[in-house]
Image: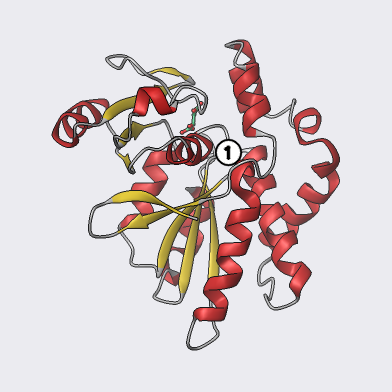
């Protein structure tokens, strides 16, 4: 959210906000929708998670400090929300950083809020390009909002933002307007050959590694295995799958 505040005043009807929390909230959101969740509702507190899941006949899940949040049965592993567990129901999710940033973004009125992670990188870039073509003014700002960890920068979120910048630059129809975008692009280009290996020093990688969540880490850091974009629906307050 630190990076996000810098641009909050720019969130307008010409802006798409990409909420990023690679380890693991936005990876989990993409995975749950890919496994048939009818939607994902991001909430900030465990109590609200339980209450809203009951109201929606959904599945409640959440994490604090990388572990299953006290009071919940399910955590924030992208591998946990299988088709069988979800049964087509909505997932109501609360995490330490990612869902809080999602709720912060909803307080502004951007054109769109989507979520991105390495697992749906191709789909996110394709979606942004398509939205720019559709925009009447042919003007579209993209704010890459990195969740980080408790208002500190996270290497993996910055690297994903850099991957999006790098891919959008390829077609030449997006201007890279700020130094932070160029910084994260360089970061990504220096590490893209082996994201898993090059992110081992990241603080949250190490936090999850201490919890032996290596399967989660492998899944989260394998690009473009999921071909959908979680898109925030203002009417329902849910993230839904846009293929
Ligand atoms: C977060 O919100 O910071 C992450 O989702 C934490 C996690 O899942 O380990």
Q: Secondary structure at mark 1?
A: loop
Image coordinates of residue 217 in percent, x first then y, are 64, 25
| Left or right placement of residue 169 versus residue 121 in this view | right
**Image point 51% across, 28% down: which residue?**
78
Name the residue at the bottom extreme: 137
Q: Is residue 215 above or below residue 219?
A: above
Image coordinates of residue 175 in percent, x first then y, are 68, 76
Question: In this figure, which residue is indicated by the disc labeled 1?
Answer: 22
**Local crowd size for mark 1, using a 10 Å CA cut-off: few (<14), some (14–19), many (≥20):** many
**Image point 68% across, 26% down: which residue?**
218
User: Is residue 203 among the parts visible in the rendering?
Assistant: no
- Residue 235 sits in which quadrant? bottom left
CB of residue at label 1: within 8 Å of ligand 1?
no
Q: Is residue 125 above or below residue 92?
A: below
Image coordinates of residue 192 in percent, x first then y, are 81, 44
Task: Between residue 165 and residue 207, name the one nearer to us.
Answer: 165
- Residue 13 sits in which quadrant? bottom left
Rendering colour mode: secondary structure
Q: Is residue 46 above or below residue 239?
A: above
Q: Is residue 231 above or below residue 141?
A: above
Image coordinates of residue 2 in percent, x first then y, are 50, 49
User: Is residue 28 among the parts visible in the rendering?
Assistant: yes
**Image point 57% across, 32% down: which residue?**
23
């Amino acid at each position: 959210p630190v990076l996000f505040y810098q641009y909050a005043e720019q969130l307008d009807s010409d802006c798409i906000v990409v909420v990023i929390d690679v380890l693991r909230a936005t990876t989990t959101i993409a995975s749950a929708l890919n496994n048939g969740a009818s939607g994902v509702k991001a909430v900030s507190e465990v109590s609200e998670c339980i209450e809203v899941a009951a109201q929606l006949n959904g599945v409640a899940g959440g994490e604090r400090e990388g572990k299953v949040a006290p009071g919940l049965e399910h955590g924030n592993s992208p591998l946990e929300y299988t088709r069988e567990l979800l049964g087509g129901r909505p997932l109501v999710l609360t995490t330490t950083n990612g869902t809080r940033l999602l709720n912060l973004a909803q307080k502004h009125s951007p054109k769109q809020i989507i979520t991105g992670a390495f697992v749906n990188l191709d789909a996110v870039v394709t979606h942004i390009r398509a939205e720019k073509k559709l925009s009447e003014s042919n003007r579209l700002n993209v704010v890459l909002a990195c969740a980080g960890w408790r208002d500190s920068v996270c290497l993996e979120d910055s690297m994903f933002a850099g991957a999006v910048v790098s891919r959008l630059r390829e077609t030449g129809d997006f201007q890279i307007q700020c130094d932070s975008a160029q910084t994260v692009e360089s970061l990504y280009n220096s590490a893209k050959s082996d994201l898993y290996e090059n992110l081992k020093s990241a603080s949250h990688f190490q936090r999850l590694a201490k919890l032996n969540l290596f399967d989660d880490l492998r899944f989260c850091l394998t690009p473009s295995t999921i071909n959908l974009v979680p898109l925030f629906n203002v009417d329902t307050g849910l993230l839904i799958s846009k293929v």
